[in-house]
Amino acid sequence: MTKLTVISGPTAVGKGTVVRYLLNQNPNISLSVSATTRSPRPGEVDGVDYFFVSHERFDQMIEQNELLEWATVHGVNRYGTPRGPVVDALSNGRQLILEIDIQGARAVKASMPECNTIFIAPPTFADLKTRLASRGTENEDEIARRLVTAEAEMSAAGEFDHLVINDEVAKCASGVLDLMQE
Ligand code: 5GP
């Protein structure tokens, strides 16, 4: 059974919703909480959704080798996976999910080839555009920036161990869970 699962996919594909659904149904599975330099969105809680940190603190985390991987995503903010909780979960035999971007997925696969990488894809690219625009959490500049990243992200799908299409949250979550049980 694979203990470390890396879930990635283009922006706004709904990975967060799929992962939350999966965690609610399976309390034995944990999610790694990333550090980010981006500001919290309304309702996001520090230490739960992310560790919201300053650029100075992020630099320090890199210097002190506290991050398993990190990347600049959408050209502005940095995001990284704290190393300690991953090591702890794996040494305790817990199933752990990392929900990170493509660059992060590549880095984790390179350093831990035994991990299972899963790409969540939208049914179509048009569907992704609609989701991004209707989410209402980003301004126009940010939406445009994320669409550029999304195209590049879609072209990386073939690098992953598995691909699951998110046409319906419960179905996608169960597809991911099946792959985690392999
Ligand atoms: P958002 O700002 O919408 O929360 O996340 C933007 C992107 O950053 C998403 O694609 C998400 O998967 C990615 N991300 C979140 N945490 C990490 C991380 O720790 N490392 C990397 N490489 N990407 C991350």
Image: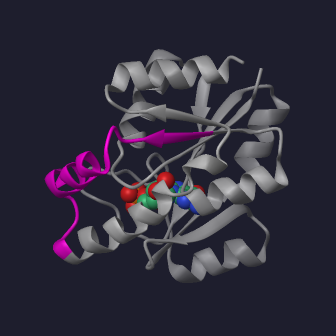
Nearer to us in this view, 119 or 69:
119
In the depicted structure, whether residue 166 falls above or below residue 125: above
Residue depicted at 78% across the width and 39% down the height: 88
Nearer to us in this view, 47 or 130:
130
> Could you tell me if residue 152 is visible in this image?
yes
Nearer to us in this view, 87 or 170:
170
The C terminus is located in which quarter?
top right
Residue depicted at 28% across the width and 59% down the height: 41
> Could you tell me if residue 28 is visible in this image?
no
29 sits left or right of 121 in the view: right
Q: Which residues are magenta?
A: 118-140
7 sits left or right of 96 in the view: left
> What count of labels does the image hold?
0
In the depicted structure, whether residue 91 falls above or below residue 45: above
Residue 154 is situated, as x and y percent measured from the top left of the image, at: 46, 55
Residue 62 is situated, as x and y percent measured from the top left of the image, at: 71, 74
In the depicted structure, whether residue 63 falls above or below residue 99: below
